[in-house]
Image (cartoon, rainbow, N blue to C red):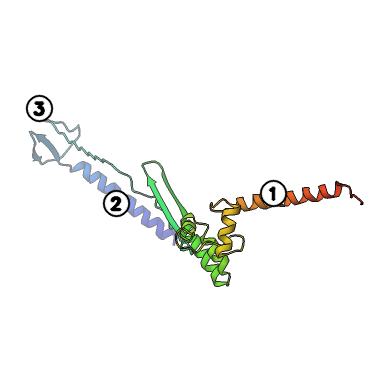
Amino acid sequence: MKWVKGVAYTFLGILWLIIILGTAAFAVTQTNTSGSNTNISGAYTGGSTTYESGSTSSSTTTNSTTSNIRSAPYTSAAPSLGSMNNCALALSAGVQNFSIGVSAGRHFIDPVCQTINLSKALHGMGMKVAAISVLCGNEEIFHAMSAAFANTPCPIEGKIGAEATKILFEKYNGKMPTYEQYLKLELKKIKDQKNKIKIEKIKPNIVR
């Protein structure tokens, strides 16, 4: 197969030389005059091709592209927030400009809705007084249930009805009690009892 390739390459080389020589011997000269083309037949023997005086050949290509970008494509999107808590309000937002994008989201809990759900949960477990007490933590509900309005006072220290009203005015001066106030009064009560016990131990017994 090698000698076949050699013969093929030799034939192609000879054919290429024949084409080159034939083109040199039988070339056709062309002169551009004032934009018109005139064919001159005859053998070309040498020299150079010249343009007639006053003749010009010019080719100009101009490509112009203008792009005016007024806004960038928005890639920042507000995140999707979901919650199983029906008292949660989801808020999210996203901002995008040419160089940077920011998105954020957050849950907000409705305290009134949360209080109602907690009260329902306690009531479902049979703790009715505790369920009403949770609702009474709301100032509007506390005032609405007071003796001045509905005359169904909120439970205080486990007492209901008239007993709760009595404790409210004797211990809390008729104001809505809070856990902090209750804790402060109880600690003061315990402290007073301890001081009383110490005084009784120090006081000498009088034998008559």
Give the answer, above or below, for where 12 lies relative to 23: below
For label 3, the SS is loop
Q: Which residue bears the numbered disc 1?
A: 188
Is the residue marked by circle 2 packed among few (<14), some (14-19), or many (20+) residues within 10 Å? few
Which one is earlier in the sequence, the residue at label 1 or at label 3? 3
Q: Quadrant of residue 28?
A: top left
The residue depicted at 25 percent of the width and 44 percent of the height is: 21
Foreground tag (1 vs 2): 1
Q: Amino acid at mark 1?
A: Lys
Q: CA distance from mark 1 to mark 3?
A: 120 Å
Is 171 situated left or right of 35 in this image?
A: right
Q: Which residue bears the numbered disc 2?
A: 15
The residue depicted at 37 percent of the width and 45 percent of the height is: 96
Q: Which residue bears the numbered disc 3?
A: 54
Asked whether 48 or 205 is in front, the reply is: 205
The residue depicted at 31 percent of the width and 50 percent of the height is: 14
Give the answer, above or below, for where 157 lies relative to 66: below
Foreground tag (2 vs 3): 3
The residue depicted at 37 percent of the width and 54 percent of the height is: 9
Q: Amino acid at mark 2?
A: Leu
Task: Tell me the quarter of the image containing the N terminus.
Answer: bottom left
Q: CA distance from mark 2 to mark 3?
A: 41 Å
For label 1, the SS is helix
Q: Quadrant of residue 101?
A: top left
Is 156 situated left or right of 150 in this image?
A: right
Is the residue marked by circle 3 packed among few (<14), some (14-19), or many (20+) residues within 10 Å? few
Is the residue marked by circle 1 packed among few (<14), some (14-19), or many (20+) residues within 10 Å? few
